[in-house]
Amino acid sequence: MNIINPATEEIIATLEPDNKASALHKYELLKKSFHSWRQTKLTERIDIMKNYASILEKNIEACACILTTEVGKPLQQSRNEIKGAIQRILWLCDNAPAVYRQEWMRQDASFKEYIDYEPLGTICNISAWNYPYLVGINVYVPALLAGNTVAYKPSEYALLSGLQMQKLLYSAGLPENVFQVIVGDKHIGEELLNLNFDGYFFTGSYSTGKYIYEKVAYKMVPCQLELGGKDPLYVADDVSDITSVARSAADGAFYNNGQSCCSVERIYVHENIYEPFLHEFIQEVASYKIGLPTEQGVYIGPLTRRAQIPFLEEQIQDALNKGAKIMLGGKRIDRKGYYFEPTVLVEVNHEMRIMREESFGPVIGIMKVKDDEHAIELMNDTEYGLTGSVYSANIERAQHIFSKLNTGTVYWNCCDRVSPALPWSGRKHSGIGSTLSFAGLRAFVQPKAFHLKPA
């Protein structure tokens, strides 16, 4: 497999992919190691993961350089990702004991009842390329803390980062047969679906997640899916600082080139402030520096995948055919690499693909609304349900809107944010299950009920 730098289109590495036999061998190693790893004390597993966080800290620059070279995100954003990953590891380690301890429900002379939490077994983690460290750590760290063994398949667009994670985990003291990286594309992913894992955890698109869910359903094992979004943001007419709000919304839409499941993908603005907001928003996006992701100050680097460029072009053309107007950008950049101009569209509506399909790129549609109820109607007009953002000076006004949104996460005066203390979960086509928080730690264990009656 050739690994290509999306900023230069140069081959930076060639890897030998796994095949059916090698994947089976790694799976069997993980299965054999499960019982010994399960019996390892939780305190020892925590120490290894904290050591991993420490080693990541010492290797931020090297890891960030690898990440930037293979996925194209600006170097500072790669550093930010790894720093965020370290904080997540530490939070998960600090909170695992409280989540995994026995829970006594009844203790009296006649009967005792308690719940114990046992690991699932050997799990399969099919991961994503847009935030390989953060998305990977959401799954394999709590899985390992809980006593599971893990087959980790990084995306074929982030293989070097996946192998780097494995290297650092081993150097932190993790036994090699407890965590195995599977190298390959969708073909080796298909082979993993045929193996008898005790759980499947996938991050990626709705179409692939749906396929995995259907393919493994007969096994009756946990299958958790962290999928995409078409995340809306609403700007109410009582905001006090339109410039600040516009900058925040633009960052939410264009950070990491819009390649985030929780990127802002639709913006609705109250008609009373639409014009000044649009002016400030366009000024902010026009100021973004575009260039090689290793250059100082670059905010927009290349897209990770070449195939996304024609997809974005089709979305934009569809919008133009239906009456939209381009205020900024709108086309690929004529240079080596997978570059696309930051694009702002207005006079959009929900008949257009760009307001309904996940774009996963540096494009945004901005739509005028007459009031809060109009905004709620449009925000909910989607098959996705990941996040929703409201900018308003009034928390009661925002809470009223939040109560009507069918999303797993809501934001007041912020957006595109993840906290390890809060569950990350989607509704509808945005996924099933939760990562992070106590709910995410519990996703990798299964309860066993104990009924104890003294003789």
Image (cartoon, helix red, strand yellow):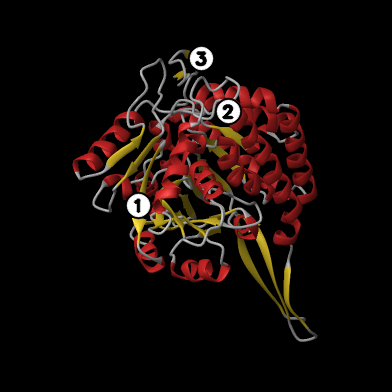
Say which element carries label 3. Answer: strand
Question: Do residues under tags 3 and 1 come within 8 Å of each other at their CB atoms?
Answer: no
Amino acid tagged 3: Ile
Give percent across and percent down for residue 141: 65, 44
Q: Give the residue displayed 63% in from the left and 66% down from the top.
A: 448
Quarter occupied by residue 95: bottom right
Figure check: 387 above or below 320: below
Q: Give the residue displayed 51% in from the left and 69% down from the top.
A: 397
Give percent across and percent down for residue 101: 74, 62
Question: Do residues under tags 2 and 1 come within 8 Å of each other at their CB atoms?
Answer: no
Res. 27 in view: no
Of the residues under marks 2 and 1, which one precedes in the sequence? 2
The furthest residue to the bottom: 110
Say which element carries label 2. Answer: helix
Please name whichever residue, 274 or 24, is drawn nearer the observer in this view of the structure: 274
Q: What residue is disc 1 on?
A: 367
Amino acid tagged 1: Met
Please name whichever residue, 25 or 374, is drawn nearer the observer in this view of the structure: 374
**Position of residue 63 in the picture relative to residue 68 (left or right):** right
Give percent across and percent down for residue 210: 36, 50
